[in-house]
């Protein structure tokens, strides 16, 4: 197991002094994918699926793994109390994942109005 999380009696524990680094790494991972989505949006709605690299399917696959880890942390599978700053950063990450998934759904269902709305929200989020 890595140095941040250890399994004890079927539960995961996180060393408090390393939790900040883990959450920062998760956040940086999500920010990279936000940038990937926004870069794909630079091609425009009509060309996003064709020209985006990585593809929206690849991005969603990647963020699904991160989302699972965050859910475990927030749901208490990771033993210990999360500091409020850590919990709020994890929730912020999940909100970004939600927006990326909405881009995916909008593209798959050819809904440009939804796509435009979510891209606008991602751009605003990335500037904050």
Image (spheres, rainbow, N blue to C red):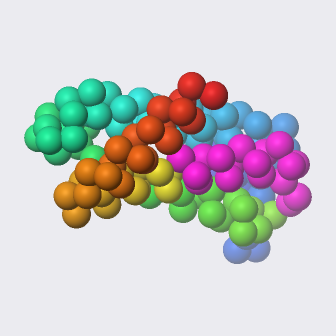
Q: Is residue 58 visible?
A: no
Q: Is residue 98 magenta?
A: no
Q: Residue furthest bottom?
A: 10
Q: Which residues are magenta?
A: 80-96
- 72 to the left or right of 58: right
Tell me the quarter of the image containing the C terminus.
top right
Considering the whole magenta stretch, tell me its main secondary structure.
helix
Relative to 39, does residue 89 appear above or below in the rendering?
A: below
Give the percent coordinates (x, y) of residue 20: 76, 37
**Residue depicted at 21% across the width and 41% down the height:** 45
User: Who is closer to the viewer here, 37 or 32?
Assistant: 37
Specify whether residue 92 is painted magenta. yes
Residue placed most toward the observer, 5 or 28: 28
Q: Can residue 45 be spotted in the picture?
A: yes
- Residue 74: horizontal and vertical position, in percent? 72, 62
Residue depicted at x 27% and y 27%: 42
Left or right of residue 37, residue 69 in this image: right
Task: Tell me: residue 10, above or below residue 20.
Answer: below
Q: Eyeballing the image, is 126 above or below 85?
A: above
Q: Give the image location of residue 15, x and y in percent.
A: 81, 46
Q: Quadrant of residue 125?
A: top right
């Amino acid at each position: 197991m890595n140095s941040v999380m250890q399994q004890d009696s079927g539960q995961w524990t996180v060393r408090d002094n390393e939790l900040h680094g883990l959450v920062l790494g998760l956040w940086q991972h999500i920010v990279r994918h936000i940038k990937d989505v926004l870069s794909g949006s630079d091609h425009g709605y009509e060309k996003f699926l064709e020209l985006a690299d990585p593809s929206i399917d690849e991005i969603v696959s990647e963020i699904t793994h991160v989302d699972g880890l965050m859910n475990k942390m927030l749901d208490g599978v990771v033993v210990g109390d999360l500091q409020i700053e850590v919990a709020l950063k994890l929730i912020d990450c999940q909100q970004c994942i939600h927006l990326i998934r909405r881009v995916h759904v909008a593209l798959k269902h050819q809904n440009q109005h939804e796509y435009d709305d979510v891209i606008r929200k991602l751009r605003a989020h990335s500037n904050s």
